[in-house]
Image (cartoon, rainbow, N blue to C red):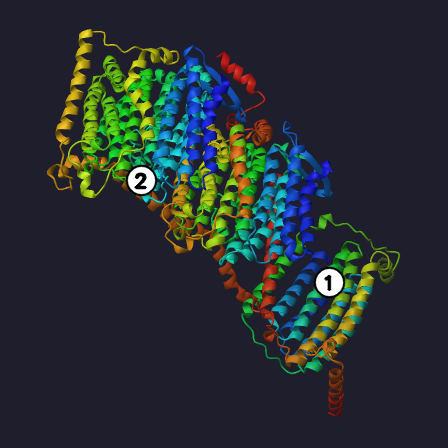
Amino acid sequence: MFEAIAFYLFAALTIGMFTITVMTSQALYALTAMAAGMIFISAFFFILGADFLGVIQIIVYTGAVMALYAFGMMFFDTTRTMVEKRENPRVIFLLGVLAATLVVFILISPIVSGHLEARYPIDAAVGNSQAIGMILFTKYLVPFEVAAVMLLVAMIAGIVLAGKKMDKSLTLMAEEEIARISAIQTSQDAKEGVH
Amino acid sequence: MEIYLYIALFAPLVGSLFAALFGATPKTMLTGIVASGLLFLSLVSSAILLNYVMMGHTVHVEMMTWIATGDLYIPYGFVVDQVSVVMMMVVTIVSTVVHVYSIGYMDHDKGFNRFFSYLSAFVFSMMVLVMSDNFAGLFIGWEGVGLCSWLLIGFWYHKESATWAANEAFIMNRIADLAMLIGIFIIYWNIGSLQYDVVFAEIANLPMPIITWIGIFLFIGAMGKSAQFPLHTWLADAMEGPTPVSALIHAATMVTAGVYLVVRANPVYDLIPDVGLFIASLGAFVAIFAASMALVNRDMKRIIAYSTLSQLGYMFVAAGLGAYWVALFHLMAHAFFKALLFLGAGNVMHAMHNELDPFKMGGLRKVMKGTFIMMTLASVALAGIYPFAGFFSKDLILEAAFVENHYIIYAVLLFTAGLTAFYSFRLVALIFHGEERYKLFGIHPHEAYKFMLVAMAPLLILAIIAGSFKLSYFELVTNLLPAVEYHIHHPMTYWMITIGTQLFVILAVLLAYKKYASWSSVPDGTSKLENCFCYKLLSNQYYIPKLYEELFSKPYRELSRIAWKQIDLKIVDATVDGIANLIYQTGEKTHTMQNGNLSSMLRWMVIGLVVLLVLAVAFTVGYNAVTMRAM
Amino acid sequence: MQEHILSILIFFPALAAMLGFIVHKDSARAYGITVAAIEFFLSLWLWNLYDPMTSGMQFMEKAPLVAAFGINYLVGIDGISLFIIILSTFFTMIGIASLTETRRVKDLIITLLFLEMTMVGVFAALDAIVFYVFWELSLIPMLYIIGAWGGPLRIYASIKFFLYTFTGSLVMLVGMLFMAYFYYQATGQWSFSILEWYRLILPENFQLWLFAAFFVGFAIKVPMFPFHTWLPYAHGQAPTIGSVILAAILLKMGTYAFVRFSLPLFPDAAVFFMFPIAILAIIMIVYTAMVAYAQEDIKQVVAYSSVSHMGVIILGTFALNVEGISGSVFLMIAHGVVSGALFLLVGVIYDRRHTKLMSEFGGLASVMPRYATIFGIMMMASVGMPLTINFVGEFLSLLGFYKQSHAFTLVAGTAIIVGAIYMLSAYKKMFFGNVTKDENKNLKDVNRTELLALVPLVIITIWLGVYPKPVLEPISNSVESIVQLMHDKAQTKEAQARIPDLANQGAMNSQQETH
Amino acid sequence: MEITLAHYLVLSGVLFAIGLIGVMRRKNLLMLFFATEILLNATNIGFAAISHYYNDLTGQMFAFFIIAIAASEVAVGLGLLIVWYKRTGKIDLDIMTSMRG
């Protein structure tokens, strides 16, 4: 009973929050609603007994990702009302609803369910985090490592991209030119620092 | 004896190849002499074989396999029997004479060597045709002579009319060849062999309709080569070739191949008298039809060509009525005097600088005594006056028609005999008698080389005496052909008919002389006679060439053009290009979809997703429905 | 070495072509001729080793490619493929020897050697996938040859050629895959080996569909009416060497595939479709002959005449008896030799005058007598003169089909008439009459290089016309086994009646005699 | 009232649809990123629910990796966005037309 109440409550909240995220014209509202929605989703994870996932959800999404977006928003100065040109809003909703109906239809139809079989059963004796750890470092070790590398690459990429001058290629420049550009760069940085 | 067979067969081929070696070099007398010599060798071999066959033997060799696949087995087999040896003799005699004659006739021609190469190749093909022991081998020769005829009619290839005539002859023959091919197919699939001996032994066991079809198709084949109506127009046009060619190919040998085929296939035609009657009727029709065209023609060679056509009609009458040996006999006699006539015409042409209109000649007997005598005698033979060759052979055909009770055919042939005599002597009278009209055109005629006349002499002798061979010939060929003697048993009737025919013919000769021997002017198309309908009809060959041109050539040309320009380019190809264009245009139209706008791309992505989902649902629902029903 | 001779034959030209990249461009021609000559002599050696009395496959080689799906590198030849392979190597050699192209000769030779690999590969392949790969690969060198060395419309022509044939082959590929799937269903194993497919008896409706799928691929390649329109463009734009190879070999892939695939795999469907295909073949024969007659360009005349002759080949193939199929296979070789020679001859005059319009010529017989002679011989062969190579094939093809339908054969037989019409009139326009154009007055007759290429063709034309046995006998032996196979597999009454039973024929004949 | 797998899956589907609508609707790139996050989270719920109801950890593993991917996506995506913003001064989707076909 408790589970049902919790499910419906959080479901309503999540849907509401995400609807705001999608529909609002205030970027700040969108961000906030999004962050709230993420946290509500972690509630489902806890209900479903995926404690570790729930925690990760809060830390990674609400902590890291949302913070990044917040920084991004400040950088782009999109805090004010956004003006977006829209075409055929009806088509968009129609498509969305259609997709939802189909997905739901597929998911609730009992075709697939009969054939599923647990390959890595949850061991009731150990806690969720422990069980995840055991599987992650045995069966999913390689994907895990790859994911780690991917994150590293993403991090470097983020830094490089954010810092790089897109219109100039250092590899193709002569030594003096690089020196000249870096001189200009430093003076510009200095000016910006003053502001 | 086999060695003689091979010599007789291959000597002309060797001669042809030898001459071909010099094809591109300037004239050398050597080629003419070697080719003629080799042909003489072939003649001698044929004579030896004739002697051997007369003693009651036949020679049959199988050289090697030609085509063998499945059940089909066609060898290069050659047979020298009573029929083929007669043909061999005719072919070698006439061709040897023509070869020697050509040395003189083609003396000034650039293509001298080439000419001998073609001419000998023709003889080789003709020998293959008559010596083969199966229908496929016959077909080799059949097509071979067609090819050589094409080459020789178009020998003077810079002349538009010559090449046109060559192509016409070839194509018209091809039409008939197709029928012949079909006839061969029917024989093969019903008998399983193409060998004469097998086919003729088995033919009686076949159902009647099939034999009839075989007979019809083979005869259509024969019609093409022998220029029977309605495939006759090529023969007159073929006179564009050098005159020795006309003598050899279009008078003595190739055109008689059709008769030879019917004679050879006598076991087939014996079983189908109805077809035989048709052949005879057509032959009679062609005889009078061609003779009528010869009456008014103003081209010396064409007149002789029509007379050939007419005589071929006679032969087909004989063959169609079952008198095969008579047909073959007339073939032989005709070959001699007709070749002689043509060669004489060649002399006249030479003398007259290739002038062909007899109205522009006249009085040539003073300058060309030898030719005059020869042509007159040949015409006498052609007219069938006793005791020349034509009398014996042609009279036999008339008798055969009479005895077989085909009185209409008999009457037609009799009338044609009169026409024959008339146009032959019209020609002789116009050329050799009367005023010397050629002087108006500033021509100085001269007699041909002596050796040409000497070369023609054997033909002259044969034209005179061939009739006397009748008995020994009869004994010879009736070993193979049905020995039916055509005698009118009532002596009174016999004599009446014979003498009546002779009188009729002589009357026609005299009439021709009376009308034309003192001709003095060159008709210019204004006289009353020339403007009457009958004259125009005849001189335009019953408008048949024109009709063919309008009915077949032009529509075919037009249809071809339509097939290319309208159908091939505008329909077939345009459809293909249309499909390609459709795809291309679809791309052109829909590429705005790829406008680079990310937000519309995203929308397309979602649409794609929805489509995939719909498909997934549809398939699962459908699958379930099927499995449910299966359960 | 003998057991690998086929692989050597297939891959030697490819290897040589790759090595060709490092050959200096001045010696490329000599290199190409040497390679092609070696290849040709290898193929002659193959003929020497071939046992003409055996009807089955010889020199089989097998190496697994994708074992899980039964895809093997499987090659082997019988009498049907042997001579087409020899024809391919022969024409590559002749083609390279007679090259007059001056632009990028080295690239052209390399392309030709690659093409040679694909051609030999197609005719030697016994695995459907290997066959398909070579079949498609053969398009690429041809695309280059037309597209890079062709006439002004070459891009259009080459793309049309490529897309058209490619589309057809894709349908064929679907058919092959389904065939393999069916084999899997029937036997529980995957196999793409044609020889194993031969053993399978398919239900009639499957046969019809599969036959149709294969037919699309083959018919476009042949090309059959109404899929033929790529051919005139390809021929019109291709350089001489391209036309020669295209007409002599590439078109034969289609007809060869009919014999190799369509007939033995789907005998019932072959009988079912016999008359529709015969009608198409007759349209090909008569209609394209008419189109050929209307052409103004001598090369187009020869191109359309190719289509017309291919009609006879198709007709012979669907005669479904030994006479017809042997005849059609023989005619493939004959037509290869003759049309190849005719295209070479057209190339000769094109090199001199840079035009192919017949109205530009006239009276060439007196200027170029040797050329006129060779052209005349080849023309007569094309027209089907007995004692030339074409006659044997045409005669047997028509003879074979006569067994199936009398009326159709009569109509198809008009090939010998209409063929004569367009060929003779083209010959007349080009060679007869007076020399009217000044440019033609000083034309040089065929030179030694050209004679080197043409004279062997003339010799073959006459030699195989007079004595076809060395070629016809192996062909006929192999065809007999195919016909027997078809008879044994035939299920419908009609098919059993129309395909002769060779094994029991002797018995039947004697039965007939007793009646 | 038992909460079944279907409930979660329906919820997941609905959230996914919201995300889709966002993807189509938004022209501002940053907001677009938000919508994609919603899509990812919607699937995550589905994975976690299946994992729970089938007693199998694989679903959670997938959700885990999805989160990792989402994180790197944000990092790289934002980096690219900054570069774009520096060059054009806008982050509006409609001006990104360099991929025109």
| Separation of marks 2 and 1 at Cα, in angstroms | 84 Å
Where, quadrant-wise, is the N terminus of chain C in this rendering?
A: top right
Q: Amino acid at mark 1?
A: Ile
| Callout 2 secondary element | helix
Residue annotated with mark 1:
D45
Q: Decide if residue B186 is in sight here.
A: no
The answer to which quarter of the image holds residue B431 is top left
Q: Whole-percent x and y of residue B424?
A: 21, 28
Q: Vertical placement of D64 versus A177: above or below?
A: above
Q: Does the image show residue A180?
A: yes
Mark 2 or mark 1, whichever is nearer to me: 2
- Give me the chain letter of mark 2: B
Q: Residue at x 39, y 28 (%)?
A: B180
The residue lying toward the viewer, choosing from A140 and C73, is: C73
* Left or right: residue A148 compared with residue B468: right
Residue A80, quarter of picture: bottom right
Q: Element under label 1?
A: helix
Task: List the residue tagged with mark 2.
Answer: B552
